[in-house]
Image (tube, rainbow, N blue to C red):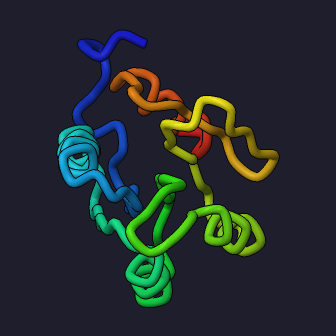
Amino acid sequence: MNLELISKFLLAGVSALIVEDENLVAMDVESLLCEFGAERVWSTGALAQARRVLSENADISIVLLDLKLQDGCGEGLLAELALAGVPVIVTTGYSGFASALAPVIYKPYSTECLLEAILDKLRL
């Protein structure tokens, strides 16, 4: 993917929830999504807050979910989201993790890798 050729409105209309306990990573991803046109982006490092954001915002297009969070493991939330039909991409540093429920990208990942995964999952 050549980022120079991508429109800054590539993710127009997309709303995303970033569930990531590393603040710098979350801020970088949030900035990236906004730069590429995401309409709304929420970020949290805790499962409880992620569930609250999801319950208050039924129009979330995609969730970027880390596994190791402040208040537990994200695998339970992954299963809940998959059951509800919410598009999810797992972002993790655990290189051996695999899931039939969602694509997995491993940290550290590139901007291109993240955008390709989002576009593929949302079929944009």
Question: In the visual, does 123 lie left or right of 27?
Answer: right
Q: Residue at x 28, y 51 (%)?
A: 22
Residue 16 is at least partly visible in this image = no
Judge by depth and name the residue closer to the eye, 58 or 111: 111
- Is 25 located above or below residue 96 in the figure? below
Considering depth in this image, is 67 or 7 the residue closer to the camera?
A: 67
The part of the image, by quadrant, that contains residue 3 is top left
Is 85 left, or right, of 65 in this rendering?
right
What's the residue at 35%, 37% (across, down)?
10
Placement of the N terminus among the 4 image quadrants: top left
Question: Where's residue 32, x and y in %?
Answer: 23, 39
**Residue 58 image point, x, y percent:** 50, 81
Residue 94 x/y as whole percent: 57, 37
Look at the picture and state if 116 lies above or below 1. Answer: below
Q: Position of residue 2 (x, y in %)?
A: 35, 10
Let me know if residue 74 appears in the view: yes
**Residue 39 position (above or below residue 114):** below
| Numbered circles on residues, count | 0
61 relative position to 86: left or right: left
Q: Which residue is found at the position 24% from the left and 13% from the top? A: 4
Q: Residue at x 60, y 34 (%)?
A: 120
119 or 89, nearer to the observer: 89
Relative to residue 14, is residue 88 drawn left or right? Answer: right
Q: Quadrant of residue 16?
A: bottom left
